[in-house]
Image (spheres, helix red, strand yellow):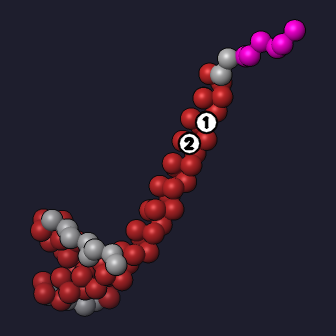
């Protein structure tokens, strides 16, 4: 089970303000503070797993690329073995 995303209060207030502005500008809806916080909580709950999973895919890709690069570097460090006569 995924731990719910906890935002610092300042960030949460900024996001709620952004949601309120969006609702007003795009939907002509005035959204109060409580409604904005509830909307943000809902969106975080619903979107967080998708965003987290995509971040994991992205991180996995970066790690795989770095591991391939490290493997190439290690092969480059190998020394030739003298052949038997």
Q: Which residue matches tag 1?
A: 71
Q: Position of residue 58 (x, y in %)?
A: 50, 58
Q: Secondary structure at mark 1?
A: helix
Position of 54 relative to 74 (above/below): below
Identify the residue at image location x=54%, y=41%.
66
Q: CA distance from mark 2 to mark 1?
A: 6 Å
Q: Which residue matches tag 2?
A: 67
What's the magenta region?
80-85
Q: Position of residue 79 (x, y in %)?
A: 67, 17
Give the quarter of the figure containing the N terminus.
bottom left
Whether residue 24 is visible, yes or no, is: no
Q: Position of residue 33 (x, y in %)?
A: 12, 83
Identify the residue at image location x=73%, y=16%.
80
Position of 15 relative to 30 (above/below): above
Identify the residue at image location x=31%, y=81%.
45
Quarter location, residue 25: bottom left
Q: Is mark 2 in CB contact (under 8 Å) with mark 1?
A: yes
Closest to the observer, 21 or 68: 68
Give the quarter of the figure containing the C terminus.
top right
Whether residue 50 is visible, yes or no, is: yes
Position of 58 relative to 31 (above/below): above
């Amino acid at each position: 089970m995924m731990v719910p995303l906890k935002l610092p209060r300042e960030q949460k207030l900024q996001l709620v303000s952004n949601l309120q502005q969006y609702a007003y500008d795009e939907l002509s809806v005035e959204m109060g503070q409580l409604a904005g916080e509830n909307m943000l909580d809902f969106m975080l709950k619903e979107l967080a797993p998708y965003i987290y999973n995509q971040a994991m895919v992205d991180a996995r890709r970066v790690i795989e690329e770095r591991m391939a690069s490290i493997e190439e570097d290690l092969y480059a460090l190998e020394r030739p073995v003298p052949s038997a006569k």
